[in-house]
């Protein structure tokens, strides 16, 4: 296939091929935002049964309908939506919540902000979601919930998660921040636990800038979440008032302009997801015939929305002595030189992160650490072999600025050919300390 571009060969992806930057903003989006300014209702008014204003109310109804869920509460971030889900579901200070070692930091942050302790489980090497078979070993008398993540837009192993939760009487919560529109056995993400958080941060398939949702089918959780959204002030018009006053609330209110923009973006979300699925199929077809590279695995019962398209490197099938991170970085440098957008997303298991370690590593700030076993909170790499293997041997195709769900078929064919070229020319690659600097 010729010399790799990084060794002086011709670049594989034609420079004239257009790329679409994210997010896309249309005339309909602009009109929707201007409409709010003309109406001059800019924020949600407090009423006896919640917060009300036209764009927010319509958005909540429309997003719930999109997901096939009963209730959606618009909030000012995915992290807010997750914290709301954790707290409104009934997780309390001192509880342990089991979650995946691979996610965005917001997942354990939401647990910590409810006063609870995140307990991490390694991932399934095929899906990169929490390995349900490893959950039971982490359950203690203090475990109250499992917060599983639909990572990269692929739903987790929900039947297996629910089976463990039923056996141990645990709450099941969902981080669906990357997965609006994803399905598990025909059911939409957001409906797979008692409550879920979603993000509409500007990097997401459903991109508004900043914002999010808490979604539930449970009336009690919904009412408690309303309380949490407005610093405890929004009293449901019912007799629930007193029993929820122990909940520590925050301000998760939203603004009308982003809600209006969210409605017009939501109207295009199914199409965005379809584009991602079409593009994933194109790249999949190239990778099927490419020794040394594997497309992301999607179990039969799942429909992914490909928030990320993570490619695994199989070193034994490549003509190179490079291994692990060195090979990954060399691959990324070679692909960048060919004109292919690549990205890293996350670099270490969450329990190794300084925020987690400084907060509760080695039993720090864990309310019962004097009586319990602080050793269980020490980060040990050997507890997360699959998460570490994934980081060392994989990378994401496309990046936040030009994500896979916004690109043309032509670009995806060009990327597929470039992937094949680099894999077959792996012998030409040299160790590269940082792929970013090699381009
Ligand atoms: C898996 C996951 N959880 C939580 C979040 C937090 O969402 P936000 O950034 O909107 O607070 C994000 C995205 O940023 C995410 O990808």
Image (cartoon, grey):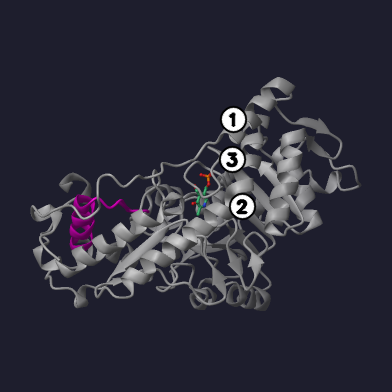
Q: Quadrant of residue 249?
A: top right
Q: What number is the disc on residue 197?
A: 2
Is residue 244 or residue 159 the one in the foreground? 159
Mark 1 neighbour class, 10 Å CA radius: few under 14, some 14 to 19, many 20 or more: few
Disc 3 from disc 2: Cα separation: 11 Å
Q: Which residues are magenta?
A: 326-345
- The answer to whether mark 2 is within 8 Å of ligand 1 is yes
x and y, in percent, of residue 59 in the image: 71, 42
| Residue 62 placement, left or right of 147 | right
Q: Quadrant of residue 1?
A: bottom left
x and y, in percent, of residue 9 in the image: 10, 55
Mark 3 neighbour class, 10 Å CA radius: few under 14, some 14 to 19, many 20 or more: many
What secondary structure is the magenta-colored segment mainly?
helix
Is residue 283 or residue 358 the one in the foreground? 283
Residue that mark 3 sits on: 211
The answer to which of marks 3 and 1 sits earlier in the sequence is 1
x and y, in percent, of residue 347 in the image: 33, 55
């Amino acid at each position: 296939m010729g010399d790799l571009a990084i060794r002086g060969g011709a670049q594989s992806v034609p420079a004239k091929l257009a790329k679409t930057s994210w997010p896309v903003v249309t005339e309909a989006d602009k009109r929707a935002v201007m409409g709010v300014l003309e109406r001059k209702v800019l924020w949600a008014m407090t009423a006896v049964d919640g917060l009300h204003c036209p764009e927010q109310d319509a958005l909540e109804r429309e997003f719930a309908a999109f997901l096939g869920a009963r209730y959606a509460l618009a909030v000012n971030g995915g992290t807010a939506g997750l914290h709301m889900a954790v707290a409104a579901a009934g997780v309390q200070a001192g509880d342990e919540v089991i979650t995946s070692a691979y996610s965005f930091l917001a997942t354990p942050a939401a647990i910590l902000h409810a006063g609870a302790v995140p307990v991490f489980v390694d991932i399934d090497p095929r899906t990169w979601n929490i390995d349900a078979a490893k959950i039971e070993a982490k359950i203690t008398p203090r475990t109250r919930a499992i917060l599983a993540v639909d990572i990269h837009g692929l739903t987790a192993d929900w039947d297996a998660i629910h089976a463990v939760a039923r056996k141990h009487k645990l709450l099941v919560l969902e981080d669906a921040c990357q997965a609006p529109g994803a399905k598990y056995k025909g059911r939409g993400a957001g409906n797979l636990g008692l409550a879920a958080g979603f993000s509409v941060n500007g990097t997401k398939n459903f991109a508004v800038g900043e914002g999010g949702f808490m979604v539930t089918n449970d009336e009690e959780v919904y009412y408690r979440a309303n309380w949490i959204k407005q610093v405890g002030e929004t009293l449901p018009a019912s007799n629930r008032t007193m029993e929820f006053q122990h909940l520590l609330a925050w301000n998760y209110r939203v603004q009308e302009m982003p809600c209006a923009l969210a409605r017009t973006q939501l109207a295009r979300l199914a199409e965005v997801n379809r584009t991602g699925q079409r593009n994933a199929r194109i790249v999949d077809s190239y990778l099927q015939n490419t020794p040394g590279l594997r497309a992301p695995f999607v179990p039969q019962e799942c429909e992914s929305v490909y928030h990320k398209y993570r490619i695994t490197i199989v070193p034994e099938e490549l003509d190179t002595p490079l291994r692990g991170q060195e090979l990954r970085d060399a691959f990324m440098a070679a692909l960048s030189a060919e004109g292919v957008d690549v990205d890293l997303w996350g670099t270490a298991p969450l329990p190794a992160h300084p925020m987690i370690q400084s907060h509760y590593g080695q039993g720090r700030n864990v309310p019962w650490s004097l009586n319990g076993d602080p050793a269980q909170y020490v980060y040990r790499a050997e507890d997360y072999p699959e998460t570490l293997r994934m980081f060392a041997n994989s990378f994401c195709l496309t990046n936040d600025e030009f994500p896979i769900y916004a690109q043309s078929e032509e670009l995806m064919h060009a990327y597929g050919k470039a992937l094949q070229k680099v894999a077959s020319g792996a012998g030409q690659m040299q160790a590269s300390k940082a792929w970013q600097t090699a381009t």
